[in-house]
Image: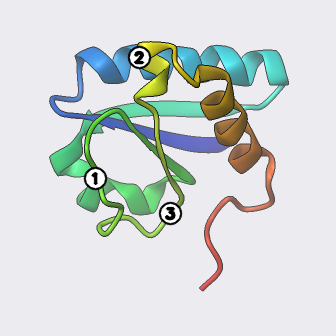
Amino acid sequence: MKKVLVACGNGIATSTVVASKIREACEEAGIDVSVSQCKLLEVKSKAADYDLLVTSGMFTGGEANIPVIGAISLLTGVGEEETIEEILMHLKSNGCRPAK
């Protein structure tokens, strides 16, 4: 099972929308996934336990040693399909974690 961490400013509103879209896309693609939500400020302490970080806020990725995908498009609808494809590509890849 792949584990996705979705982070937004408060870990509630926008991350809920993004998490729902990720779950739906993974279900359609046949990917077994666990999606959790958190605040952007919690990423540093939580990211190591996940395969992929998806954010709906400003995040530079400096605090996460996993692939990071910006997902503002899942809120605006502009470029949503491309973002979903990128998320699915990462989750289908072996391991999902970046090479060291």
Q: Residue at x 65, y 29 (%)?
A: 84
Vertical side of 38 occupied by 78: above or below: above
The amino acid type found where label 2 is placed reads: Leu
Q: Secondary structure at mark 3?
A: loop
* Image quarter hosting the N terminus: top right
Task: Name the residue carrying label 1.
Answer: 43
Q: Is residue 10 left or right of residue 63?
A: left
Q: Secondary structure at mark 2?
A: helix
Vertical side of 61 occupied by 20: above or below: above
Q: Are marks 3 and 1 in contact (CB under 8 Å)?
A: no
Task: Name the residue carrying label 2.
Answer: 75
Q: How many marks?
A: 3
* Image quarter hosting the C terminus: bottom right
Q: In the rendering, which numbered label is found on residue 66?
A: 3
> Disc 3 to disc 1, how far (Cα)?
11 Å
Q: Nearer the viewer, residue 80 or 24?
A: 80
Q: Residue at x 50, y 63 (%)?
A: 66
Q: Is residue 35 left or right of residue 10?
A: right
The amino acid type found where label 1 is placed reads: Val
Q: Residue at x 79, y 54 (%)?
A: 93
The amino acid type found where label 3 is placed reads: Ile
> Disc 2 to disc 3, how far (Cα)?
22 Å
> Disc 1 to disc 2, how far (Cα)?
20 Å
| Residue 52 drawn at (x, y percent) | 54, 50
